[in-house]
Amino acid sequence: MTSNSVATFLSEHFGLTGQQISLNPIGNGHINTTMLLKASQQSLVVQKLNTDVFPEPEQLVNNARLIEHHLTDKHHAGDYDLAIIRHVRTVNDNFLVNCEHGVWRALEFIGGSYSEDVVANIAQAQTAANAFGKFALALQDFDAKQLHSVIPHFHDLAMRAEKFKAVLQHDPVNRLAQCQVDVDFCLSQFDLIDELSALDGNIPLRACHNDTKINNMLFCSHSGNAKAVIDLDTCMPGYWLFDFGDMVRTFCSPEQEDSTNLANVRVREEIFAAIVKGYVAPLQHVITEQEKQSFWLGAKVMPFMIGLRFLTDFIDGDHYFATKHANHNLQRAQNQFALYKDILRKETTLKTILNINTL
Ligand code: ADP
Ligand code: MG
Ligand code: MG
């Protein structure tokens, strides 16, 4: 199928008419293939779903639509002021279409918007965190258990640790010797598992976004305000500490996730404070005391857990994360551990920021 025939196929299925149909890449997502399907009267975002990561696309769409409905009700009640990304039905009243190129869905295109791959400044960090906070607030009365776990055990550190230990046993591509120091470091940090499991039953299970990167926020081209929270693929039951921690992980370092300039991998305290301020403000009347306290653990655990996953994949021979060279996953792991260590170093300061802004 040529790109032209994919465009024709999708426009027929999603009911776009006209002569001038075009299909071009949009954004910089890492999981799905995201394109803008343009006709003379209408534009749609179309996504080929990555079925290696999401083997159950129907469940993924179903989760997102449940959230869409809930947010729409909130919007009508005046309780949610961000745009809502809605799935578009096919002419046959489905949400997914299959072609030889894969499984596709369509979303309403939000014009006049842009996304960022790296946080531009403190104000933008606060704006994005605040929008993720509004999203969390709007879902706080949504029964998280309605959501199917499209990636089971996503933030289950005990399971990630078991996988890590299993890979250590096999060392399938003889890389262990190269990263023994990092392996030993990981093995010394598994108290985090107990810290996390101590929370079970003590903090509420929430409908979480689970991918609170800056890239999953649309900003208004005119004002720079947040326009919409996007990428609901990994919305699943979880704890707010994970969404908070993933913002800390992805907003706070001045270096990219795979930078080898480890001396500059650090948590920028002013960005951390902006996240706390932005995220907690909308939640202040519903967040529990223990949940607030758990945000410290979230900040620690997210860089550690993703670092552990990078290291596991490195030792395993790079099966999960796309890599550009042989040491890519190891470099990413070392980057995340450097961030984690800096967070530990700054414990007192960061806890003070959390307390000042949240208590
Ligand atoms: P992935 O799951 O691969 O990360 P996303 O759903 O995050 O894919 O989309 C990738 C990018 O496409 C976003 O960062 C954004 O730039 C753009 N995008 C996605 N959905 C929309 C939309 N409804 N309107 C405008 N742009 C969008
Ligand atoms: Mg995304
Ligand atoms: Mg995604």
Image (cartoon, grey):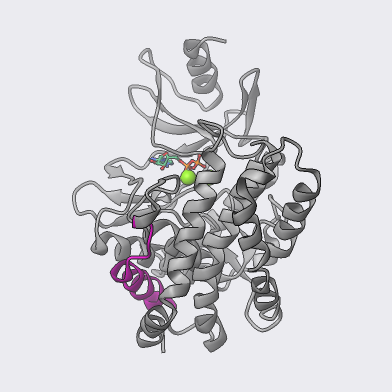
171 lies above or below 282: above
- Can residue 268 be seen here? yes
The correct choice, above or below, for 304 with respect to 178 in the image is below
Q: Compared with residue 289, is residue 278 higher up or lower down, i.e. above or below?
A: above
What residue is at 59 percent from the left and 34 percent from the top? 49
Q: Position of residue 28 (x, y in %)?
A: 41, 37
Where on the picture, by quarter, is residue 276?
bottom left
- Residue 84 in percent (x, y) is at 43, 52
Q: Nearer the viewer, residue 348 or 177?
A: 177
Q: Nearer the viewer, residue 120 or 263?
A: 263
Whether the magenta-drawn stretch holds residue 282 is answered as yes
Answer with the quarter of the image where residue 54 lies.
top right
Is 65 placed left or right of 130 in the picture?
right
Helix, strand or loop: magenta stretch: helix
Tell me: 112 left or right of 164: left
Q: Residue furthest front?
A: 177
Q: Nearer the viewer, residue 96 or 319?
A: 319
Q: Which residues are magenta?
A: 264-283
Give residue 131's position: percent from left, percent from top.
38, 63
